[in-house]
Amino acid sequence: AQTPVKVTVTGAAGQIGYALLFRIASGQLLGADVPVKLSLLEIPQAVKAAAGTAMELDDCAFPLLSGIEVTDDANKAFDGASVALLVGARPRTAGMERGDLLQANGGIFGPQGKAINDNAADDIRVLVVGNPANTNALIAQQHAPDVPAERFTAMTRLDHNRALSQLAAKLQVPVTEIKKMTIWGNHSATQYPDLFHAEVGGKIAAEQVDEAWLRDTFIPTVAKRGAAIIEARGASSAASAANAAIDHVFDWVNGTEWTSAAIPSDGSYGVPEGIISSFPVASRDGKWEIIQGLEIDAFSRERIDASVRELEEERTAVRELGLI
Ligand code: NDP
């Protein structure tokens, strides 16, 4: 039998964690033939709640789940891990300045990066979900000098999936008709969902919708969907975020021709090297590759640049705070 793959989830007692863990244990993260061991990392005051979730996982008797550990010790949690889903983060609270938010998250993602560096398996892959996800991923990466930089990624797959769903509804086509969707930049309100390369039925999506809808409805609806969910549900999106995390890791491991992921820039498309920015990506042989050769018109250029500028500002801020 195959050796189980260790998957570590931080913030495991949170609402995304609750929507995520059962799907990992059922085989949806890595494949229906891959046994998994789960490690649930939480802050001390949430360990008891995480242990409760572990009891429920036990009660599912998942055939692929070979063990569960619950801990508040990052070294233990990441020991031998091949996949790390960094979900727990310090949310922005009323009156909090950006510097305070970055500082608080630096205190989480710096030590977690070091614990990954010192303990994880050689094939470790990291997905950061906790916000500000791109910059938290950068902080963790900078504390893990022995891990290849490209193993640190941040999630824009939920934005990607939201874009697919909005466009499918507008054109009244199944989501499977849409190819080559791309989210560029930061997982924030400045993100740019690009319809100039997306194709529906083999034709460019931007040519099948009017420009006003694209500019004034589609882009803001995708970018502000998180707030709309909070308004409707009274809580932030959780199951859809967990679903996107599953999609991201599954495609990273198993391959895909085209999706969106925030990965360290190699300078492609004028995005400064090292910044963890969302790109159109393929996954081949277990590695993300930025899809090259796309023509970027002035409309797209302006929006990509604005989101990338925000990422550069966040990088400068965490440098000035001594967090990287
Ligand atoms: P959630 O599980 O709802 O969210 C966790 C993180 O995911 C937040 O930073 C949230 O950002 C982010 N996120 C990213 N994309 C999305 C999206 N599309 N929709 C919603 N959230 C998104 O938070 P909970 O408060 O329920 O749980 C967090 C848990 O993390 C707690 O149990 C806490 O104890 C734990 N924690 C653990 C740490 C650790 O393991 N060391 C450190 C810090 C916290 P946003 O807030 O911007 O929505």
Image (tube, rainbow, N blue to C red):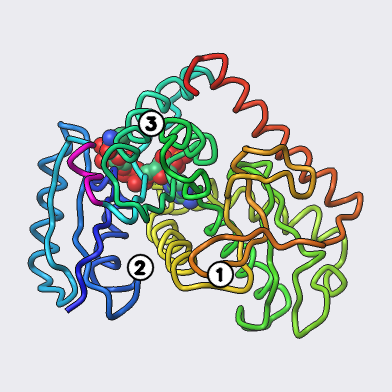
Magenta-colored span: 75-80
Whether the magenta-drawn stretch holds residue 76 is answered as yes
- Residue flagged by tag 1: what amino acid is it? Arg
- Residue labelled with disc 3: 90
Residue at 32% x, 56% y: name it: 82
Residue 246 x/y as whole percent: 40, 64
**Would you say residue 230 is visible in this rendering?**
no
Left or right relative to 195: residue 227: left
> In which quadrant of the rendered image does the N terminus lie?
bottom left
Q: Nearer the viewer, mark 2 or mark 1?
A: 1
Q: Nearer the viewer, mark 3 or mark 2?
A: 2
Q: Answer whether labels 2 and 1 touch (C-beta < 8 Å).
A: no
- Residue flagged by tag 3: what amino acid is it? Arg
Q: Callout 3: helix, strand or loop?
A: loop
Q: Answer whether labels 3 and 1 touch (C-beta < 8 Å).
A: no
Q: Quadrant of residue 186?
A: top right
Residue at 66% x, 75% y: name it: 168
The reply to whether the residue tagged 3 has its Cβ within 8 angstroms of ligand 1 is yes
The residue most toward the right is 298
> For residue 268, which numbered disc appears in the image?
none
- Whichever of callouts 3 and 1 sits on the residue coming sooner in the sequence is 3
The reply to whether the residue tagged 2 has its Cβ within 8 angstroms of ligand 1 is no
Residue at 34% x, 38% y: name it: 117
Left or right relative to 109: residue 270: right
Q: Quadrant of residue 177?
A: bottom right
> For residue 29, which numbered disc appears in the image?
2
Residue 311 x/y as whole percent: 64, 34
Residue 266 x/y as whole percent: 68, 46
> For residue 284, which numbered disc appears in the image?
1
Q: Is the residue marked by circle 2 packed among few (<14), some (14-19), or many (20+) residues within 10 Å?
A: many
